[in-house]
Amino acid sequence: MTPKIKELRRSYGFDEVAIVPGDITINPEQTNIDFKVGNITFTVPILAAAMDAVTDVNFAILMSKLGGLAVLNLDGVQTRYDNPQEILAEIARTPADKVTALLQKVYSEPIKDNLVGERIRAIKKGGGTCAVSAAPASAKRLAPLAVEAKADIFVVQATVTTARHVSKSYRGLIFAELCQSLPIPVVVGNCVSYSACLELMRTGIAGILIGVGPGAACTSREVLGIGVPQITATMDCAAARDAYLKESGRYVPIITDGGFRKGGDLCKAFVAGADAVMIGSIFAQTREAPGLGYHWGMAHPHPALPRGTRIKVGTTGTLQQILFGPTSVTDGSQNLVGALRTAMGVCGVTTIPEMHHVEMIVAPAITTEGKSWQLSSCR
């Protein structure tokens, strides 16, 4: 008898696909890239990751003023230490062979309730829209503090998030109850499958983060072996979003989170179905980033597993340059908004929802075809 073999489905990442130009072109300045969470509208559909090397109070204020949104991690150093700048500097200067142990030690310090309110109020005082993030284990405790301090959006984020979680706890985090109890939009993540995404949307959430392990500083794929390449994950979850819209009449935006290296990746995510994107390592390279040219993962809470490797990303420009240019590099990591608007113009679409219907093809040679001189110059 022939044994039944498990079938594997082919999946695709950013470097394996390409966007097909449209039959007409549009002036990039005529495109509308607005993005909405709950009743809050952003003119730039880009979020800065809830990571200590990316978002602090000052970065959140600046990102908001530029039209996007930065998410402050309430499980990070900003709420564990009165002097987070000193801790961040210590992480940056610690030798590579000792930094994992240091990170485990740094994040073992208890979260201080008073600092949660202080950081949120500082962002609001600076004129920023305030989004904050918490792990599922601390969400029920931190959410009321965030609401009291007038946060605008609450994010619940873990390596993998589902609507049903089995635990020894008598009563764990129930998203439907959390959404009903909070007067602000709740965004959750991370998710990569159609079925899990659909179930999460049915709980009443206002947005969902897509991606497991693609980030430059994430180690989930190496340590745990889990993840789905971002193009396929985005397409599957976009299908769930569309199915839920037909089912309920409610549109829940999906936010592709992680794995971006250049503007082309960002554009491909929107064609795959993303309503917005969340970026970490590219923003960690900005002069305003608190990581001082370094970046590290934070999602996994296990005390004996790495929280993500620390990588040196350097400093390449200002946040203004990264988002709007003028670009000083040729690798596509600056002027992300310009890249998106230009791609939309070339595809002949004026809005992000129209971008979802643009043709995309499997094209593994897209980054190497005819680029022998560029590739050799990088060696």
Image (spheres, rainbow, N blue to C red):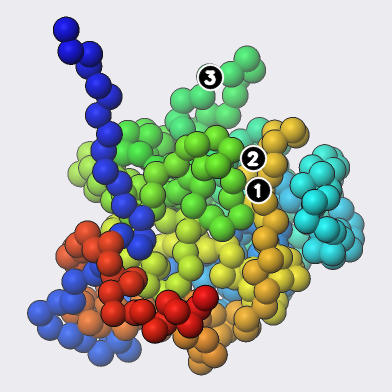
Question: In the picture, residue 273 is in which quadrant?
Answer: bottom left
Can you tell which of label 1 and label 3 is closer to the viewer? 1
x%, y% of residue 260?
47, 64
Q: CA distance from mark 2 to mark 3?
A: 17 Å
SS assignment at label 1: loop
The reply to whether the C-beta atoms of the residues labelled 2 and 3 are less than 8 Å apart is no
The amino acid at mark 1 is Gly
Crowd class of label 3 (few under 14; some 14 to 19; many from 20; radius 10 Å): few
Mark 1 touching mark 3, by CB under 8 A? no
Give the alpha-carbon distance from disc 1 to disc 3, as whole Å: 25 Å
Residue 191, image x, y percentages: 44, 42
Label 1 crowd (10 A; few <14 / some 14-19 / many >=20): many
Residue bearing mark 3: 166
- Asked whether, in this view, residue 239 is left or right of residue 368, the answer is left
Element on which disc 2 rests: loop
Specify the quadrant that holds the N terminus: top left
Circle nearer the N terminus (2, 3): 3
Query: x, y percentage for residue 211?
Result: 45, 48
Q: Nearer the viewer, residue 347 or 200?
A: 347
Write down the residue under mark 2: 300
Whether tag 2 and tag 1 are in contact, CB under 8 A, the answer is yes
Q: Name the residue at 68% across, 74% down.
A: 314
- In percent of width and height, residue 106 lies at 83, 47
Q: Residues within 10 Å of mark 2 (few under 14, many from 20)?
A: some
Asked whether the viewer can see residue 148, the reply is: no
Q: Secondary structure at mark 3?
A: loop
Which amino acid does the dot numbered 3 rest on? Val
